[in-house]
Image (cartoon, helix red, strand yellow):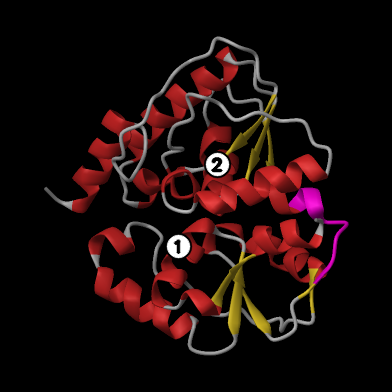
């Protein structure tokens, strides 16, 4: 089985790109504002979603996490399977509307891009999408000695990132961490090569769970998550 087929099967049968077993239970409740965690923070880097939950609570933002959250379908689109991607998106749109969702807060740049670029072209999606970083735009943290890893799927946030993270260079840590668009699933060696290059200099601050997951596997001491830094800043 090729990696596209494996990812497709994981998402359709398990509800996540990793193929992890999960309970998808519709609580039948209305949830007007939700935090969509995304597959990587849900199954690989839960500490990041915990930091975001702490952060939103400290900022006094009301939200819930759906008990039946499933994959947004990003990797399907990037691997060229638009038909299955649209099926996943339409199923999610139906679910969001059933729950009465009016706003989606997302911490994953990939989910953010998918909701804002793919879901908005489909019928029935009239939901505000907010990136978590936008909700802490009034804060500042010192990033001296670090370089920012701007994720491919949220490059429009690079200026905002530098307005919050002070004393960091304008230049990105690297053009890509090597995780996205199925690269990691298709060529772990290429991913390792790209990630090693990214952490070869100063410590890296990233606001993408997939980037953190990839880079920390190479050198955990050289990779810092933005939301954990912000959570510590507001403690």
Task: Name the residue located 71 percent from the left edge and 81 percent from the top edge.
Answer: 170
Of residues 158 and 107, which is closer to you in this image?
107
The image position of residue 59, as x and y in percent, is 83, 44
Provide the residue designation for mark 2.
37
Q: Residues within 10 Å of mark 2 (few under 14, many from 20)?
A: many
* First to last magenta residue range: 134-141
Task: Name the residue located 38 percent from the left edge and 45 percent from the top edge.
Answer: 77
Q: Is there a contact, CB below 8 Å, between mark 2 and mark 1?
A: no
Number of dots carrying numbers = 2
For the view shown, which residue lies furthest in the left direction?
1
The image position of residue 159, as x and y in percent, is 75, 68
Q: Residues within 10 Å of mark 1 (few under 14, many from 20)?
A: some
Determine the CA span between mark 2 and mark 1.
14 Å
Question: Is 170 in the magenta?
Answer: no
Q: Secondary structure at mark 1?
A: helix
Relative horizontal placement of residue 46, taking residue 65 as reference (left or right): left
Quarter of the view holding residue 116: top right
Whether residue 175 is visible to the viewer of this picture, yes or no, is no
The image position of residue 189, as x and y in percent, is 26, 75
Q: Secondary structure at mark 2?
A: loop
Task: Name the residue located 69 percent from the left edge and 86 percent from the top edge.
Answer: 145
Relative horizontal placement of residue 68, taking residue 75 as reference (left or right): right
Relative horizontal placement of residue 3, taking residue 114 as reference (left or right): left
Provide the residue designation for mark 1.
213
Quarter of the view holding residue 58: top right
The image position of residue 161, as x and y in percent, is 73, 66
For the view shown, which residue lies furthest in the right direction?
138
Whether residue 24 is visible to the viewer of this picture, yes or no, is yes
């Amino acid at each position: 089985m090729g990696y596209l087929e494996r990812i497709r099967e994981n998402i359709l049968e398990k509800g996540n790109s990793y193929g992890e077993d999960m309970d998808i239970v519709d609580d039948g409740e209305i949830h007007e504002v939700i935090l969509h965690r995304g597959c990587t923070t849900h199954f690989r880097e839960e500490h990041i979603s915990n930091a975001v939950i702490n952060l939103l609570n400290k900022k006094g933002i009301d939200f819930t996490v759906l008990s039946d959250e499933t994959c947004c379908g990003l990797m399907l689109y990037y691997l060229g399977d638009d038909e299955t991607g649209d099926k996943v998106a339409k199923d999610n749109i139906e679910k969001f509307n059933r729950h009465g969702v009016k706003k989606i807060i997302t911490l994953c740049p990939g989910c953010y891009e998918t909701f804002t670029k793919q879901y908005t072209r489909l019928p029935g999606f009239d939901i505000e999408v907010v990136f978590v970083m936008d909700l802490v735009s009034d804060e500042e943290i010192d990033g001296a000695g670090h370089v920012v890893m701007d994720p491919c799927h949220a490059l429009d946030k690079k200026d905002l990132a530098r307005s919050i993270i002070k004393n960091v260079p304008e230049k990105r840590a690297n053009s890509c961490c090597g995780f996205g668009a199925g690269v990691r699933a298709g060529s772990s060696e290429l991913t390792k090569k790209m990630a090693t290059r990214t952490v070869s200099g100063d410590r890296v601050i990233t606001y993408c769970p997939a980037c953190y997951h990839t880079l920390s596997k190479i050198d955990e001491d050289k990779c810092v998550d933005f939301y954990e830094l912000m959570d510590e800043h507001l403690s």
